Amino acid sequence: MTVFTFIAIILFASILQTSTGFGFSIMATPFLLMIFEPREAIQINLILSLVISTALILKIRKDVDAGIVKRFIIGSLPGLPIGILVFLLADTGKLKFGISIVILILTLLLILNFRLKRTERRDFAVGGLSGALTTGIGMPGPPLLLYFSGTETTKETLRATTLAFYLFIYSISLVIQMFFAGTNKVVWTSSLAALPLVFIGLYVGQILFHHISQKYFRIFTYCILLFTGIYLLVQ
């Protein structure tokens, strides 16, 4: 049962990440916590997300907004140490509860047609929050997704720009996690076993991306956020 659950989590999350530009960490991390310890779940997520981002970025680099990526990276730097401190010191249950509330409130604002004007200052702030969430719980996606959805960014730019940022944030977060929290054999053997599933997800996700309209892409985004927020809250 555990093996089947692991296969289902990795395959679905890989398809979601490839077809939307977000979703692996949002979908995989909460469910990986059912199977692994928090440190293991987060590091497996970071490794596989990095593989996906690396595999995809060359094909879609023309859609990357380099200015936004640069500001996200600069903004994330002060957030990274904050996130690892939270991971090391905070109670996991309370952390999940707080994150679930934030996700649900912000998703509700988006459903109610809340719109946010993108500014350079907000780019830095979103990058900082994303950096803290990456080292803290391995989930950089929610602030980026909410920000881009609120500013009506096209799905092509959203996918390419978030993946470009992920290349940096996942790499440095994995190093920070390993240095401060340590790692073990389970993390690397599980990640290696998941690679074939990731590549299947890459193939299927690329096909789906070209068949998802902007309208349904936005609806799908809201459903994923609501699901994640409710799941974390219930858990």
Image: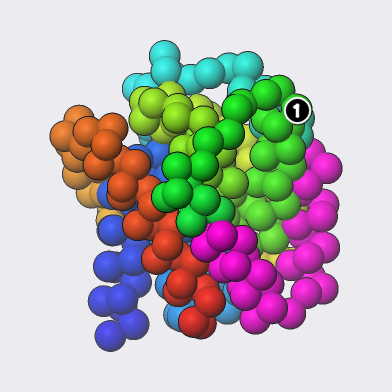
Name the amino acid, label 1: Arg
Depth check, front residue: 154 or 91? 154
**In the image, is residue 63 above or below residue 223?**
above
Q: Is residue 44 visible?
A: no
Res 84 quadrant in image: bottom right
Q: Where is residue 174 in the image (x, y as percent from the top left)?
A: 65, 52
| 87 inside magenta stretch | yes
Depth check, front residue: 128 or 62? 128
Q: Quadrant of the N terminus?
A: bottom left
What is the chief secondary structure element of the magenta stretch?
Answer: helix
Q: Position of residue 200 (x, y in %)?
A: 23, 49
Q: Can residue 176 be seen in this view?
A: yes
Q: Position of residue 176 (x, y in %)?
A: 74, 53
Q: Is residue 122 left or right of residue 151?
A: right
Residue visible at 48% across and 20% down? 64
Residue furthest front as drawn: 112
Q: What stretch is highlighted in magenta?
A: 77-105
Residue visible at 53% across and 36% down? 115
Residue visible at 74% across and 38% down? 125
Q: Position of residue 194 (x, y in %)?
A: 36, 60
Residue visible at 34% across and 42% down? 218
* Element on which disc 1 rests: helix
Q: Is residue 38 left or right of residue 79?
A: left
**In the image, is residue 223 above or below residue 124?**
below
The residue that mark 1 highlights is 121
Q: In this view, does 157 lie to the left or right of 128?
A: left
**In the image, is residue 117 above or below residue 208?**
above
| 101 inside magenta stretch | yes
